[in-house]
Image (cartoon, helix red, strand yellow):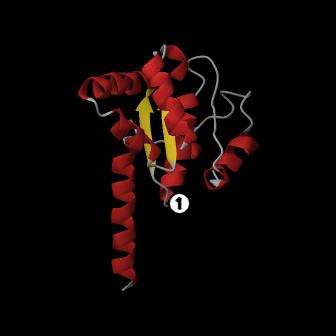
Amino acid sequence: MSQEIEQKEKLALEKRLKKAKLPYIKSIHDFDFSFQPSIDERRVKEVLSGRYIHNGDNILLLGPPGVGKTHLAISMAFEAITQGHQALFITANEFISECQKAEKQGIIQRIIKRYSRPELLIMDEIGYFSFDELSAHTLFQIVSR
């Protein structure tokens, strides 16, 4: 019976990982804090507890390119997924494109619903792309939910 439970949990984890659409899997153990001493390792490990999800808090990772923001975001998502949470990863550029296509097709509410569903939404590269009014409004709707 315990093997069956383990198998069921393993399959559920694999399903959550697939649905998350992470570009790759990285754990916090792969992150080199000595390479980026400006990052407070204690704060990152506190975030990994998942308390922010239960509290409905947002996490913003800000910094110049190449400092490890995507790695940290993926690590946080991976940890949340292993704790049983639903997550979804998308880049800002992909999000903007999806919003524009959805608007043309008259299905923008589906986008809002899709990105509001997971407990953890990771949007990467926000500072690299300009949000048009539609995408900005759609993102606001998602965050509000």
In front: 5, or 60? 60
Q: Amino acid at mark 1?
A: Gln
Quarter of the view holding residue 12: bottom left
Residue found 40% across the figure and 59% down from its top: 13
Residue found 33% across the figure and 56% down from its top: 15
5 relative position to 74: left or right? left
Callout 1: few (<14), some (14-19), or many (20+) C-alpha neighbours within 10 Å? few
45 vs 36: above or below = below
Outermost residue, front direction? 106
Asked whether the viewer can see residue 27, the reply is: no
7 relative position to 121: left or right? left
Q: Where's residue 64, x and y in %? A: 61, 17
- Numbered disc total: 1
Q: The N terminus lies in which quarter of the figure?
A: bottom left
Q: Where's residue 28, x and y in %? A: 58, 44
Residue found 32% across the figure and 25% down from its top: 103
Q: Which element is circle 1 on?
A: loop
Quarter of the view holding residue 67: top right
Outermost residue, left direction? 105
30 vs 127: above or below = below
Q: Where's residue 99, x and y in %? A: 36, 26
39 vs 93: above or below = below
